[in-house]
Image (tube, rainbow, N blue to C red):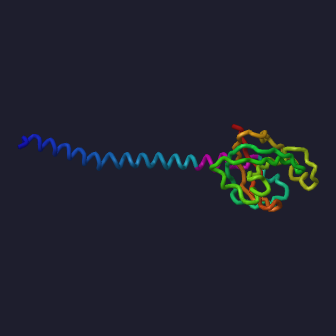
């Protein structure tokens, strides 16, 4: 048979555990929830406001913008540069082999006409020889870094389908580009 003080000791431990679970666990749960919500709001704000803004109103300098069907107003993607082409409209046409987490951004036209790559357009970066593109680049100086073949880059800008080119997928124009 157990001594009486042992029953009192067990009752005290039982009371302590109940009080702990009743008061401390909800407080900790609430604190964790507040931290997670704050982190989510911060991540959303950073991804939707600082990276996905149109610096210098770059989009207003796209020639014949009606040809671009905007799927998403702003996305970020990364990958390795397969090719860098200079276009008569003053744009660099970059073929980007996407990192696996962005592979859903290409489509069948990208597969057929762009070797499975996402097209990334850095606009108004070259001398323009295409007459109908000249006015779009007036009063605009492009400051986007031009990558080289095999560079790993991260780009941000509108995700569009180019209706003049089989609806292949593009980020056009590039708002930001970093080389890593």
State which quarter of the image contains the N terminus: top left
Q: Which is nearer the eye, 26 or 180? A: 180
Q: Residue 112 is drawn in which quadrant?
A: bottom right
Q: Residue 132 is drawn in which quadrant?
A: bottom right
Q: Residue 67 is drawn in which quadrant?
A: bottom right
Residue furthest left in the image: 1
Q: Is residue 159 magenta?
A: no
Horizontally, is 131 left or right of 25 in the view?
right
Q: Is residue 45 visible?
A: yes
The residue under the point 41% across, 46% down is: 31
The residue under the point 79% across, 47% down is: 94
State which quarter of the image contains the C terminus: top right
Horizontally, is 92 left or right of 79 in the view?
right
Residue 4 percent across, percent down from the top left: 7, 42
The residue under the point 9% across, 40% down is: 5
Q: Which is nearer the eye, 97 or 69? A: 97
Q: Is residue 46 magenta?
A: yes
Residue 161 percent across, percent down from the top left: 75, 59
Q: Is residue 145 visible?
A: no
Residue 76 percent across, percent down from the top left: 67, 49
Report the span colored magenta. Answer: 44-55
Please identify the dominant SS of the magenta region. Answer: helix
């Amino acid at each position: 048979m157990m001594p009486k003080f042992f029953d009192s000791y067990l009752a005290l431990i039982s009371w302590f555990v109940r009080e702990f679970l009743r008061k401390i666990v909800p407080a900790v749960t609430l604190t964790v929830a507040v931290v997670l919500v704050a982190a989510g709001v911060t991540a959303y704000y950073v991804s939707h406001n600082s990276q996905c803004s149109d610096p210098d109103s770059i989009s207003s300098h796209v020639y014949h913008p009606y040809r671009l069907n905007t799927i998403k107003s702003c996305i970020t993607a990364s990958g390795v540069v397969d090719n860098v082409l200079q276009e008569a409209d003053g744009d660099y046409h970059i073929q980007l082999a996407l990192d696996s987490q962005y592979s859903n951004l290409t489509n069948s036209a990208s597969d057929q006409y762009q070797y499975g790559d996402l097209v990334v357009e850095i606009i108004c970066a070259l001398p323009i020889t295409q007459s109908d593109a000249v006015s779009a680049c007036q009063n605009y100086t492009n400051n986007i870094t031009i990558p080289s073949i095999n560079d790993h880059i991260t780009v941000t800008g509108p995700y569009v389908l180019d209706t003049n080119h089989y609806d292949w997928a593009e980020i056009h124009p590039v708002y930001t580009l970093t080389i890593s």
